[in-house]
Structures are given as C-alpha cells and as structure tokens.
Image (cartoon, rainbow, N blue to C red):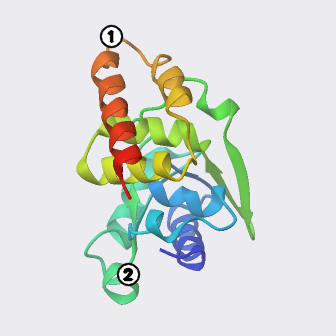
Amino acid sequence: MKLDELKHVLRASAAIASENSMVVVGSQAILLLMDEPPESLLVSREVDLYPALHPERADLIDGAIGMHSSFHETFGYFADGVGPETAVMPADWMARASLHYIGEITAICPELHDLTVSKCVAGREKDADFVRELLKLGLVSAETLRERVAMLDTKKYSLTHIQAWIERRQIEAKAAP
C-alpha cells in the first residue's frame, strides 16, 4: 500500500461514516507513523480502521468499501471496518497515540509498539511476518513489547504465551539474512 492509497481509504471512510476522526489500528498505520516506511512492511492491501466517535459505523465502511466491494475491485485496496476491541493494546495506548491530519480528517494511530502488541496478541502468520520484520529492522524493541504486553489484562490474555510468541519472532529476526 502507498500513502496516497491510505489517504483515499480515509477520505472514503470519513464520508461513509459521516465522521472526520478515524482510528487506524492495522499494519498500514505505519504509513502515517514513519516518513519512509520500508517496502517490506507495506504488503497489506487493507486499512483496519473505525470511526473514533461512532465505532458502530465501521460496519457501514466495511459494507461500502470493504473486501470484495466495487471499491476493492476498482482500486485493489480496501477498508476493513473494525471495532475498538479488534486491536488488543495496553489500556493507556491513547496516551501515546499520534494524530495525523489529512485535509479535514484526523487519523489517530497507536504508537508503533502498541500497534505491534496487537499483532502479537492476534498471532497470525501475517502478524508474525510483520513483527519479525519490525524487529529485524530495529523499528521496535522486544523489551518494550514485553513491557507493553505485561500491561494487558491477565484474565483475558495468556501473557506467557504472548511473551513466548515475541521471543520466537525475535529469534527468527536475528536469524534472518
């Protein structure tokens, strides 16, 4: 994905949801978090987001410009309208979040370690690839990830499992050419 594609999704999402503040919680938030993100981190064709003030309107976005929509077929990228519960991050993640302005639209992005924690919790293969690459490039610190994971609700998440998952990604990142 490219920055202009992300901005297109943000503008379309804002119009659909009738809201100008969007929370971007997927991997492509990196386009806003870094001036020149590495190409290896821009493989996703979707933008995971939700309207900040009316997260329930994410379904409208998903239905209009989500996967398999005419928007997706036309442009080759799409929005994944999600909810605040989709990306599991420390409770205080908003204190570290950054605001990015695209015309009249405000995109709220988690700090990169908080965003990465959500990938560690999800633990899918595509998340492993993303986290491994971040670690390999030195864009996130495994120590900070472990500190942030320790802030998660132990009643809901197996912190030991998530910490072990991070350790495996760190080992793989060090072994990667």
Residue 10 in the image: state x and y as whole percent. Answer: 56, 67
Q: Is residue 42 left or right of residue 66?
A: right
**11 relative position to 67: left or right:** right
Q: Quadrant of residue 8?
A: bottom right
Residue under numbered circle 1: 155
> Is label 1 in a helix, a strand or a loop?
loop
User: Going 58% across and 44% down the picture, which residue do you hit?
Assistant: 112
Q: Residues within 10 Å of mark 1 (few under 14, many from 20)?
A: few
- In space, the residues marked 1 and 2 are separated at their CA atoms by 40 Å
Residue sitting farthest toward the top: 155
Q: Residue furthest bottom?
A: 74
Q: Quadrant of residue 141?
A: top right
Q: Position of residue 22 (x, y in %)?
A: 58, 54
In this figure, which residue is indicated by the disc labeled 2?
71
Q: Residue at x 65, y 55 (%)?
A: 33
Q: Nearer the viewer, residue 13 or 128?
A: 128
Image quarter (top left, top right, bottom left or bottom right) of the C terminus: bottom left
The kind of residue tagged 1 is Lys
4, 172: nearer the viewer: 172
Q: With 168 as the anchor, is 108 left or right in this view?
A: right
Vertical position of residue 49 compared to residue 76: above or below: above
User: Mark 2 or mark 1, which is nearer the start of the sequence?
Assistant: 2
| Residue 27 in view here | yes
Tell me which amino acid carries mark 2: Phe
Instruction: Determine the residue positioned at 30% across, 31% down.
Output: 165
Label 2 SS: helix
